[in-house]
Image (cartoon, rainbow, N blue to C red):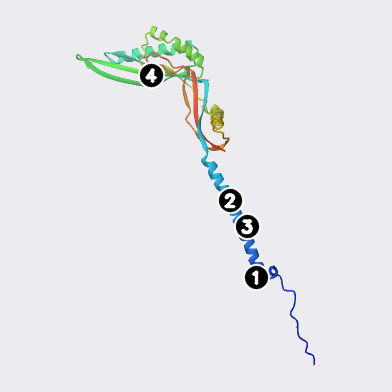
Amino acid sequence: MTQDSEEPANSATPFWRNPPARLVLASCAMLTLGLIAGGYLLGDGLTRAKMADRSVTVRGLAEREVVADLATWTISYSATANDMTSAQASVDRDTASITAFFAELGFPEDALQPIGVNVSSFTQDGVPNFTVRQRMTLRSNDIERAQRAVRRQFDLVRRGVMLEEGSGMAYTYTRLNDIKPEMVAEATRDARASAEQFAEDSGSDVGGIRQATQGYFSIDARDGDGGGWGVADTPYKKVRVVTTVDFYLS
């Protein structure tokens, strides 16, 4: 009697088809991709950090000559007498002379305005003295006419008006906001030119702006301020701004 025996299967199931093994392979693949991505990001981050450390800080300058558009002349004068009425009358005569002076030069009536008066008294050798001080201001946008008035100010002295120290014309440039954007851009270009020269000398290239600081705008007399009594202001001004810019280098 022959007994049939059962033979084992010759073909085994592949490892990668085994569900647990497939899970292990997938996990390994994800881990590998994560390590690769992490390495790239770490390397890129180090590169960017290194680039951030390479920078140069320079200053850019922009200057522009302008002509003032506002003239302001503060005129101070006074009179002293033994009685208040006489002192006030003398000041009134000076006021009339000043008003006539500017009217003859073609200034409108409202261009000249009184801005203050002061009265003081003292006694000398038993005699009372009263001093009346008056201040008036001329305000005009007609710069050429204002300059003519300054050149003829001695005419006021000839009319008996004794100008006190501190009486003088001041010229102001009021349109700074109109030229600010262009000047800041010009100063930034000047700063980049300096950075490019530095980069060329050091074998580097200039990148973008890391940070920048706009300095203060200054408006000064074009030819400098001599100062001193008798030195008048000038309508010719120089506007100046300095910017500080930090550029990346690569």
The residue beneath circle 3 is 33
Amino acid beneath label 1: Pro
Q: Position of residue 24 (x, y in %)?
A: 63, 66
Q: Nearer the viewer, mark 2 or mark 4?
A: 2
Mark 3–mark 2 Cα distance, whole angstroms, equals: 12 Å
Q: Give SS at disc 1.
A: helix
The residue beneath circle 1 is 20
Tell me the quadrant of the picture where the C terminus can be found: top right
What is the residue that sits farthest to the top in this orientation?
A: 158
Disc 1 to disc 3: CB gap under 8 Å: no
Disc 3 to disc 2: CB gap under 8 Å: no
Which residue does the image show at 38% across and 12% down from the upper left?
A: 94
Q: Give SS at disc 2.
A: helix
How packed mark 3 is, by other alpha carbons closer than 10 Å (few <14, some 14-19, many 20 or more), is few
The residue beneath circle 2 is 41
Give the image quarter of residue 130: top left
Mark 1–mark 3 Cα distance, whole angstroms, equals: 20 Å
Amino acid beneath label 3: Leu
Give the image quarter of residue 154: top left
Give the image quarter of residue 73: top left
How packed mark 4 is, by other alpha carbons closer than 10 Å (few <14, some 14-19, many 20 or more), is some
Q: Is residue 14 visible?
A: yes
Q: Earlier in the sequence, mark 4 or mark 1?
A: 1
Q: Which mark is residue 135?
A: 4
Q: Position of residue 142 (x, y in %)?
A: 51, 17
Which residue does the image show at 26% across and 15% down from the upper left?
A: 129
Mark 2–mark 4 Cα distance, whole angstroms, equals: 74 Å
Q: Image check: 83 left or right of 181? A: left
